[in-house]
Image (tube, rainbow, N blue to C red):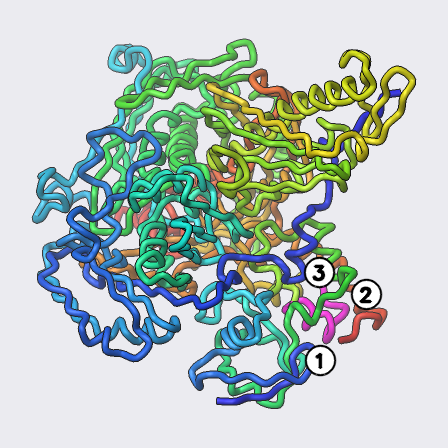
Amino acid sequence: MKMSNSYIGRPMERIEDLRMVRGRGTYVADVNRSGQLYAVILRSSVAHGLIRSITFSRALELPGVKLVLTAKDLGAAVPRIPVRLQPLPELKPFHQPVLADGKVRYVGEPVAIVIAESAAIAEDALEYIDLDIERLPAITNREQVEAAPSVLFEDHGSNKAITWKAFLGDADAAFKVADYTRRERFQIQRHTAMFMEPRGFVAEWDADASNLTVWGAAKLAWNNRRVLAAALGVSEDAVNLIEVDVGGGFGSRGEFYPEDYLIPAAARIVRRPVKWTEDRREHMMSSNHAREIECDVEIAVGKDGRFLGLRGQIWADIGAYLRTNGSMGPRNVAQFLCGPYCFDNIDLKCSMLTTNKTPSGSYRGPGRFEADFIRERLIDIVAKELDIDRLDIRRRNLVADSQMPYRLPFITPSDSSNELDSGDYRAVFDRCLREFNWEEKSKLRGSLIDGYYHGLGIGCFIEGGAAGPKENARLVLEVDGSLSVYVGSSAIGQGLETVMAQIAADATELPIEKITVSHGSTSDVKDGYGSYHSRSTVMGGSSILLAAEKLKDVIRATAAERFNCSPAEVTIDGEEIRCAGNRLPLSTLSAEPLEVEASFYNTKHTWSYGTQAAHVAVDPGTGEVKVIDYLSVEDVGRIINPLTLHGQAIGSIVQGLGGALLEHLVYDAEGQLLTGSFADYLLPTASDFPNIHSITLELKPCPNNPLGAKGAGEGGVIPVGGVIGNAVADALSHLNVQPLELPLSPPRVWELIERARQQEAGLS
Amino acid sequence: MRIQFELNGEAVVADVESRATLADCLRDNLRRTGTHVGCEHGVCGACTVLVNGDAIRSCLVLAVQVEGDKVVTIEGLSGDELSPLQAAFRKHHALQCGFCTPGFIATAHALLTNEPNADAERVRDVLSGNLCRCTGYIPIVEAVLDARVHYASGENKS
């Protein structure tokens, strides 16, 4: 009888936990090389200015200082960091140089790098570098972008980069005939991933072999190897990027930053290993920021409550440079503002504005968190004004199962065709209401209990996943019968080792204990694509499935040769091979390891989807918003590991609550970052949101990959701003308070309440 | 400066700069890298270790301040088998990237050693001094509550 594994779908405890809970993980700051030196970066303290001079001779005199590099020391052309996603030629003027080149454009921009015998000496040396900057007016908001008292990029001449356009049908015609239209402005604050392990690298140049090894790769090792090798002028084969344990990513870590070039380049010059670890203040001003947008959008609705159209203008503040994935958030806001609802007519523009702030990039649910706040708030406003039940208006407009696959808006200047793959959106919506006990809880709506007004909020979302073009896996059946799995996906804390081992174990029918998963390092597979856009399980997992089929073919062929039979006669039953009356343990099949490689190609995204509901209580005296209860119901097609999936869902929701209620990267008018520590930038803590629940379903498997899985893990964060905004509006409905800006911090909510009261009293 | 203290039950000697923090001393001088440094300003709690039984932030203490003290790090709280707290963290999926985990385990160990019957609110309150960006904390609180029984029975003294 053929043995069959069923690791997929089981809440397997994680393999990686065994080292991590004992402090035996190896994060990049734990990597030490013999004879290593330490790097520290001199960063601009001025938001916008011309560099008159940098004098560092006194720094070099400090005992222990080995090297100082400025842009002038990097040769005629300072390397600039290419855009990874949507690398349009019109974005070239906005690429960031690895060291400020004649001009500084944000506080925190790398100006020089110091290499010394210890990090402390290198930090001391910063004090001895004289940096003379002629200040220019800082551009920190949209009004200044328009007024343009200065421009960031003189050659380009404007503080506007490009404009994304999302379109479908004929929006203007739809608005002309609509029974009702509603226009509103919304704003979402700058905040970001803020993973717990600071970024870092250890780089070592082997002069004899002319090759480079860099520890600290994450997310995109192969892409970054290409960029680094080109910038250093060496072949890709001479560069090995190694992924060690990674302390969180959420879209921000692993993109190519200036330090990705600077640390290896310094190591090549000093011919000794160089180690760099950023501190938290540096992290807050140097790693990608995200989410800062404002918009003026309009919705058209029929008298029956049917959505007819969406149009308007969005402005995204991308900061001082266009980073590797800096277009994703702005692009996504425009393309996914419609979310899981039918809008036949769309005309949305999103303009990317450059400002003297830290450059921005993707953060979990890029553009989607923003879009969902706008859309779900707008829907509640419309429902209230049309006196239609807000649940009914959503049910009426959710894309129906029968409409799948469903076309999403086109997007220019770089189209990526998108269509929703499958789903029963209404079933999940109703399941959420039922599980949340919406009807019962509704009795509390608007009531004042112990000084708090109670309210409920709801919102729906879609989560794109499984970006192509492909992922690669290499399987090696070792001579002892164990299986080594190498995959181009990257671990950023999501439990990749365990999930990939589960998939490999089922595919090969080997016990999971016999499987070792390696990932994320350029030595693992020839080319890898990494972990972003909720892609690793679908893409990496599917490539492992394909490779496992190939491995079985090789095993059959090897056994057939040995037993002189045809491969078709060979049966693989777990760790045993049978053929023409012979039985053979896998561990004695071959004197050589058996190796196969496979690629999974994908052009279609997966679309997880769901509904979230919140019960909040608002203190009108202080503006505090308490989250009494929160539920997310999401369909992910197929669950590989319920334990890790559930964990990511909860974690993602809490990140969303941080964005909705707490987190804000604040700048002053001079472009100084005012929130440079965890005392100023408020992350959720253990006591903030104790009542979060998540239900994940396997209702509609994805039709476009062999696992049937849909990318998941980002989803939780996406609708949270909208859901909380709606719940706060519901709690304060007697005052007709409509939150249009995030975060809903106590001062902001208090102000909304006060303004509403004054209006009510006729004082305004 | 030369300092001496007890680390995970063994006497250690380290030559440190007077400005070195305990975290740097543990990680750089003594190569106990299980203690992680997440913010260096005493907020995130990733660097939490036990000094004479108290959970403290090793980034806010100078190495010279622990002269003669008993210091226990995550390495000292670990053996061949997972401890009850470690097993509970694994069971409840109370870690994802794992970077904050040693600090949480040190904090929770100190709490449960002193208050083995701490209720959920007390656990949440004490853990609110440590930051985790992955889990949303709920599984961490569940794990700590689950491990209480092993402390109440007195089997987990260290």
Asked if residue A475 lies left or right of residue A420, the reply is: right
Q: Toward which corner of the image does residue B18 lie, by quadrant? A: bottom left
Q: Nearer the viewer, mark 2 or mark 1?
A: 1
Q: Residue at x 78, y 11 (%)?
A: A566
Badge 1 element? loop
Q: Which residues are magenta?
A: B106-119
Mark identifier at residue A163: none
- Amino acid type at circle 2 is His
Asked if residue A572 lies left or right of residue B105, the reply is: right
Check disc 3 and report the residue beneath it. Answer: B144
- Amino acid type at circle 3 is Val
Q: Are marks 2 and 3 on the same chain?
A: yes
Return the chain for callout 3: B
- Amino acid type at circle 1 is Gly
Is A565 inside the magenta-drawn segment? no
Point out residue A604 in the picture as x, y percentages from the top left corner.
Answer: 48, 19
Q: CA distance from mark 2 to mark 3?
A: 11 Å
Q: Nearer the viewer, mark 3 or mark 1?
A: 1
Q: CA distance from mark 2 to mark 1?
A: 22 Å
Q: Quadrant of the C terminus of chain B?
A: bottom right
Point out residue A425 in the picture as x, y percentages from the top left corner.
Answer: 56, 21
Check disc 1 and report the residue beneath it. Answer: B9
Q: Residues within 10 Å of mark 3 (few under 14, many from 20)?
A: many
Asked if residue A666 lies left or right of residue B70, the reply is: left
Residue A625 visible here: yes
Of pointers 2 and 3, the one earlier in the residue sequence: 3
Q: CA distance from mark 3 to mark 1?
A: 24 Å
Q: Residue at x 62, y 49 (%)?
A: A691
Q: Toward which corner of the image does residue A697 lie, by quadrant? A: top right
Badge 2 element? helix
